Image (cartoon, grey):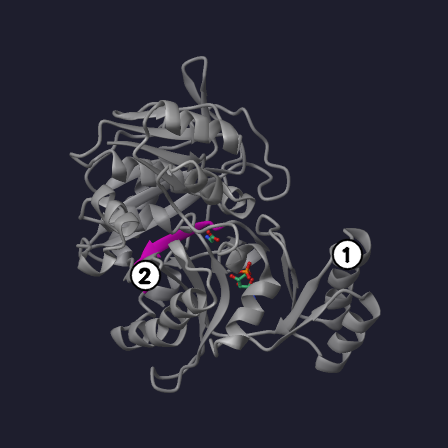
Amino acid sequence: MKILVIGSGGREHAIAWKLAQSTKITQVYVAPGNGGTSNSNNIKNIPITNIDELANFAEEENINITIVGPEAPLAEGIVDKFQNRDLRIFGPTKSAARLESSKKFAKDFMSRHGIPTAKYSTFSKTEEALSYLRKEGAPIVIKADGLASGKGVVVASTIKEAEDAVIEMLDIKKLDKIIIEECLTGEEASFIVMSDGINIMPLATSQDHKRLKDGDNGPNTGGMGAYSPASIVTPDLHNRIMKEIIIPTIQGMAKDGIPFMGFLYAGVMISPGSDAERSIKTLEFNCRLGDPETQPIMMRMKSDFVEIIDNALHGTLDKTEIIWDRRVALGVVLAADNYPDNPITDDTINGIPNEKEDCVVFHAATKISDGKYKTDGGRILCVTTLGDSVRIAREKAYKTISNIHFNGMQYRSDIGWRSLK
Ligand code: AMP
Ligand code: GLY
């Protein structure tokens, strides 16, 4: 089979790396890919990003399956376009992708279907938004309605911060709509499933680290590291997340006439307490795999990923099983100087080790120039390891990182801390 993966991040490297291990694969293409995907067996980069040109490529090359990494092409309707041309693609349609591309759609959907989430209101007028948040008080959360590359959420600890966020979004950026919602507390987990529109196959759980700095300080980022499984998601909580969030979402979308096929990622907030006391609320939906969560998830997947996606496209996920490595996988992101604002690029990267069974360095924003790996964006690499515990996986990751170098390299030294606390 020939498979096309759309995207260029660490997530897409991990997806392509896993697909390329399948005996069913003759070639994996990544469009546009990165330095890591340009330099692996069975994996080839294609310098195309335009959706129509991608569809032309898939048609001309007889691509059997296309898999979409990031949200932007899904929100633009890549799945609809491919399907209209009878090209097999795994992902939600533009309409179903609104679960991520419109926070208002997602919140209204959840409230209609009784799916637990933070209390919220939608606003287009600054005065109304300001008077609502003054009435509610801080802390409070302000969210842009549309896709914002991870910059659309402000968790405001004071009214002043919240007012500034409202003014910035509605008056300065001239956004149509914002959501103001109750600030939830607890521990977050990433709960990702695959769906063929009806059947649901949960993937291994994981936990991201969104803030730039150790101890969850500093600005929000795309994610600075992740491990799988997420220790907080006990079997009991796993059942509840499926029952309270995932199943009603897939069933609700089908009932509303917009069946969801693809990867569905629920960001959940789990309140403190014993399992029985805890409440579980949906912070957000993403209509794709997470980055960096995918890197540890792919390290743990023992089954043939091509077969699983093929089954999903045939609507037979109910007859599918996924075997997971019992070890913990943990990925630490190495980011460029000045990330997340304006990362400095074009630095030479040294010391990337060869792949080992229990340690893979997935590339994100890298390129090859003059025969060397160079930095090419914000998040550069994700050093991902397997170990019998979080502690062991983490020691391996940081030992590997001690040999890797580029100017201004930033990383957190505490990935997995919640599990170890
Ligand atoms: P989102 O893009 O909606 O996932 O938000 C990004 C991050 O903002 C989440 O991972 C949380 O850390 C935080 N966040 C979002 N909504 C809330 C909320 N209602 N209460 C507290 N934190 C939130
Ligand atoms: N790591 C968070 C995300 O992929 O949205």
Where residue 327 sits, quadrant-wise, is bottom left
Q: Which of marks 2 and 1 is nearer the N terminus?
A: 1
Above or below residue 260? Residue 383 is above
Q: In this view, does 360 lie to the left or right of 75?
A: left
Q: Is mark 2 within 8 Å of ligand 2?
A: no
Work out how far the residue at label 2 is from the one at label 1, CA to CA, in angstroms.
35 Å
Report the disc number at residue 168.
1
Which quarter of the rendered picture does the C terminus lie within? bottom left
Question: Magenta segment: does it hold 35?
Answer: no
Give amino acid for label 1. Answer: Glu
Q: What residue type is labelled 2?
A: Thr
Element under label 2? loop
**Magenta-span inclusion, residue 228:** yes
Task: Write the start and end of the magenta stretch as one range.
Answer: 223-230
User: With respect to residue 141, does 76 lie above or below?
Assistant: above
- Looking at the image, which residue is at 65% across and 72% down? 140
Q: Position of residue 324 (x, y in %)?
A: 19, 55
List the single residue furthest toward the top.
370
- Count the numbered circles shown: 2
Q: What element carries label 1?
A: helix
Instruction: Tell me the residue that label 2 is attached to.
Output: 205
